[in-house]
Amino acid sequence: MTDNKSTVLIPGRMHPRALERLTAAFDVVQTQPGSELDLSPETKAKVKGVATINRMPAEWMDQLPNLQVVSNFGVGYDGVDARHAGEKGVLVTNTPDVLNDEVADTTLGLLINTVRRLPLAETYLREKRWENEGPFPLTPLSLKNRHVGLLGLGRIGMEIAKRLEPFKVRISYHTRTKRTDVAYDYAPSLLDLATSVDTLISIIPGTPETHKIINADVLKALGPNGVFINVGRGASVDEPALIEALKTGTIAAAGLDVFYDEPRVPDAMFDLPTLCMLPHVASASVPTRNDMADLVVDNLIGWFRDGSVLTPVPETPVRK
């Protein structure tokens, strides 16, 4: 390793663009999934930075005595123990904003696909059933006159709301603190939100406080005309309760881009015609993922150049 480059650890996989730029700027140590910290004590001592895709638990940080910064690929960083990092004086960064539009666009697409069953309609056509059996059945649901509730109204939630407005739906929201800069109706609790709307979109991060908060009571409150969409974190949903709600008609339909134990999806979900599923692709376009990769690298370059970063997370204030 050279003397003039800081050592950056990549524990497991990394976006190719980020890997290329990191390799040019730093002495990179990349380990394999399942043996992320399988390094000699000498190498661990050299590591000053980490580039990761949402995985950096406290026990990994504790093995790196000279760690200064963790640059996370993704706006969500629930897999990075940021509180522990802050206690150790380690900075954590993420990649917000550059994926807001892509995730919001995908959310609207997932909502329309779920309500109008467009993936099923395309399959019907491709299987030549239109020709052989006649028109695809009318969909029982429509986006017309719906009342959409947003669970979370941060950067991405606001972009979703702006995109919903031209669809002439009513918009409400619930967050921990009521916003003063929007005209949307505020619900003081998740249950109040689910009771008042017929379409619930979850954009919340995965935290201990949000674990399985979309439960049987919330789904029952949403009602038999209800539609649930999740583009936040799968851990916020009680999946057995959701499966049961779809089976029994407690709600009408659901669209999921995220799951509790990714990439494993419960077998029971594949037999639900009212469930539309995507394999966690909300931000998965080449332009957006390239922007995310650049932000991962730019945060590390800025830190080791002059102690500045573009997108620190609130648990770890910038300091060097």
Image (cartoon, rainbow, N blue to C red):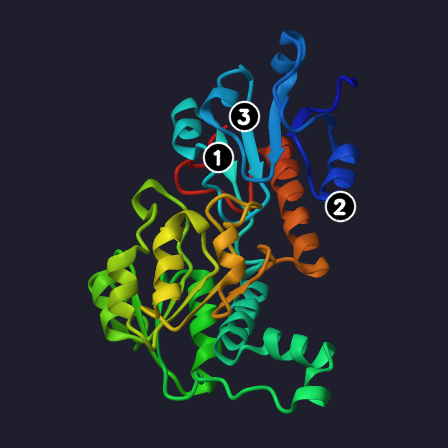
Q: Residue at x 29, y 70 (%)?
A: 222
| Location of mark 2 (residue) | 17
Nearer-N-terminus badge (3/2)? 2
Which of pointers 1 and 3 lies earlier in the amino acid sequence? Answer: 3
Helix, strand or loop at mark 1 = loop
Residue drawn at (70%, 44%) of the image: 15
Q: Check the picture and name the quadrant holding the N terminus.
A: top right
Residue bearing the label numbered 1: 80
Residue at the far bottom in the pictured view:
134
The answer to whether one can see residue 187 in this image is no
The numbered disc on residue 68 is 3
Q: Amino acid at mark 1?
A: Val
The span from disc 1 to disc 3 (Cα, nearest Å) is 14 Å
In this picture, is 196 found above or below 132? above
Vertical arrangement, residue 133 with respect to residue 171, above or below: below
Q: Are the two marked residues, 3 and 2, in contact with CB atoms closer than 8 angstroms? A: no
Amino acid type of disc 3?
Answer: Gln
Secondary structure beneath dot 2 equals helix
